[in-house]
Amino acid sequence: MEYSPCIDGDPDPGEVVWTWVPYEEDPNQGKDRPVVVIGRRGELLVGVPLTSHRRPAERQIAVGKGPWDTAGRTSWAKVDRLIEFAPYDMRREGAVLTRRRFDAVVAAVRSGRGGRGGNPVP
């Protein structure tokens, strides 16, 4: 895992990008969603999907509001769901997370935390 955002048209760790994310209940279906890129695994990028729906039963951490959500809603990183995707599968770059928000997401992924509510990480 690394923090190396660079808004240059390529997805990088530390950025929120839009890519196709399969549904959990049916991986053959899915939709474009914002994903926080947290690292690389070989040629693939690794990220966690964002959602605007707070579900206490799921492991989520608040990342706040950002330009990736045009409605201005608070977003939650689903820290129990890692997504792998090829860089060419990125639909568009959304924004750069602050280092503090990125570190909070990575820490929650590593420790298995999430689902604790509270305010978004500044």
Image (tube, grey):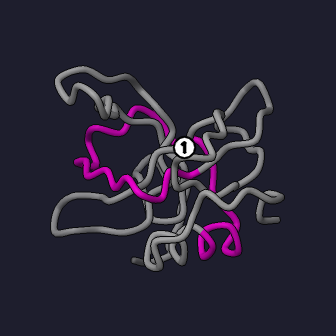
Q: Is residue 52 above or below residue 59?
A: above
Q: Residue at x 32, y 59 (%)?
A: 46
Q: Residue 96 magenta-drawn?
A: yes
Q: Quadrant of residue 43?
A: bottom left
Residue 57 x %, y %: 55, 46
Given the current orientation, which residue lies at the most extreme front position? 57
Quadrant of the image containing the C terminus: bottom right
- Drawn side of residue 34 relative to residue 32, left or right: right
**Circle 1 — which element?**
strand
Q: Residue at x 29, y 68 (%)?
A: 40
Q: Which residue is mark 1?
A: 50
Instruction: Give percent across and percent down for residue 80.
Output: 41, 57
**How many labels, in total?**
1
Where is residue 72 shown, x and y percent of the image? 80, 32
Residue 101 on the magenta segment: yes
- In the rendered view, would you say 30 is above or below 92? above
Q: Which residues are magenta?
A: 77-104
Quadrant of the image occupied by residue 51: top right
Q: Amino acid at mark 1?
A: Leu
Residue 21 as seen in the image, left or right of residue 100 = left
Q: Is residue 49 above or below residue 6?
A: above
Tell me the quadrant of the picture where the N terminus can be found: bottom left
Residue drawn at the location 46% of the way across and 36% of the way down = 18
Q: Residue at x 43, y 77 (%)?
A: 110
- Please say if 105 is above or below 57: below
Q: Residues within 10 Å of mark 1 (few under 14, many from 20)?
A: many
Left or right, 110 with respect to 87, comes to right
